[in-house]
Amino acid sequence: MQYTMEGYTLDELAIKLLQTYATDEPFYGGFSGGIDSQIIHSLAERAEVEVDWYYNVSPIDPQIIRDFIKQEYPTVEWAYHARGYWNKHFMSNGLPMRTARWCCGVIKEPGGVGRVKILGMRKSESQGRKGYKCFMDNPEGGHWLLPIVNWTDEDRRQYVSQFGLKSNKLYSLGFKRTGCVLCPFQGKHDKKLCLKYFPEVVKLWKLACDRYIKERNTNPKRKPVTFKNGDEYFNWWIALD
């Protein structure tokens, strides 16, 4: 693993960050079941800092993720922030887009307000995260601590190999990233795999699209849309990249 300007390896620096920002109150840890969250979980154990770990249960996560967390990380608490996702949030917002990704605010981001929240976000994941730092203000209150914010995919692979972290089955199925089925940030490769392996979640998306288009085009209080039906709406969305 590469060395930093401070002379530490990346994992050593991450451990020092965790120890530096530790207080009498445990960290709030965001755990998704993906490799990045596994790495920060491992780093926190090595740093010997106290963390309350939470998995924000997603109505559009594949069952593989839930099973993996239950089996491999049984001490992680399950938090239910996304109740009403289909009937309330989806019907208000429609399909999430890369430029209007409201779903994360409902599913992934709640919890840990007012506390120091450990997250596995990295700069290399998206253009919007390139300006992230290892310690940041949480827009909702408190702070974010991002121990692996500067790690590359290769750094991540080396750590997983060195410490023998067991990955969930999504990676062995060929997925490049884990998380919600048909996330707007997924590329065509992962979207095709979602359609193949998770038809039950895809069906939920399609049913929601049907309800949304019918409501938009029949409710006089809402502006109608150009899509004739839910299938047309869903197929347009799934083709985006």
Image (tube, rainbow, N blue to C red):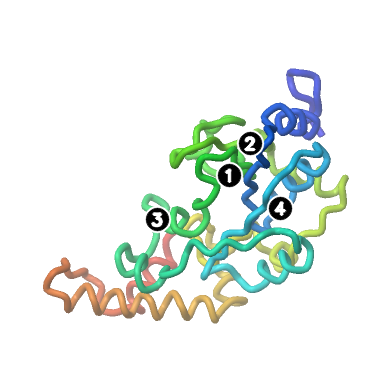
| Residue behind mark 3 | 102
The local secondary structure at tag 4 comes to helix
Of the numbered discs 3 and 4, the one sitting upstream in the chain is 4
Q: Quadrant of the N terminus?
A: top right
Element class at badge 1: helix
Q: CA distance from mark 2 to mark 3?
A: 23 Å
Residue 235 visible here: yes
Q: For the residues marked 3 and 4, what is the alpha-carbon distance in whole angstroms? A: 23 Å
How far apart marks 2 and 1 lie (CA) works out to 9 Å
Dot 4 corresponds to which residue?
35
| Mark 3 vs mark 1, CA separation in Å | 18 Å
Instruction: Give the number of the disc on residue 149.
Output: 2
| Mark 3 or mark 1, earlier in chain | 3
Q: Which is closer to the viewer, label 2 or label 1?
A: 2
From the viewer's perspective, tell me whether residue 197 is left or right of residue 161.
Answer: left
* Contact, mark 3 vs mark 1 (Cβ under 8 Å): no
- Indicate which label's residue lies in the foreground, 4 or 1: 4
Relative to 179, does residue 88 appear above or below in the rendering? below
The correct choice, above or below, for 134 with respect to 180 in the image is above
Tell me residue 149's x, y (percent): 63, 36
Q: Secondary structure at mark 2?
A: loop
Image point (27%, 75%), residue name: 213
Which label number is shown at residue 42? none
Q: Residues within 10 Å of mark 1 (few under 14, many from 20)?
A: some
Contact between marks 4 and 2 (CB within 8 A): the answer is: no
Which amino acid, mark 2? Val
For marks 2 and 1 on the same chain, the one whose residue lies earlier in the sequence:
1
* Mark identifier at residue 125: 1
Where is residue 166 shown, x and y percent of the image? Answer: 81, 59
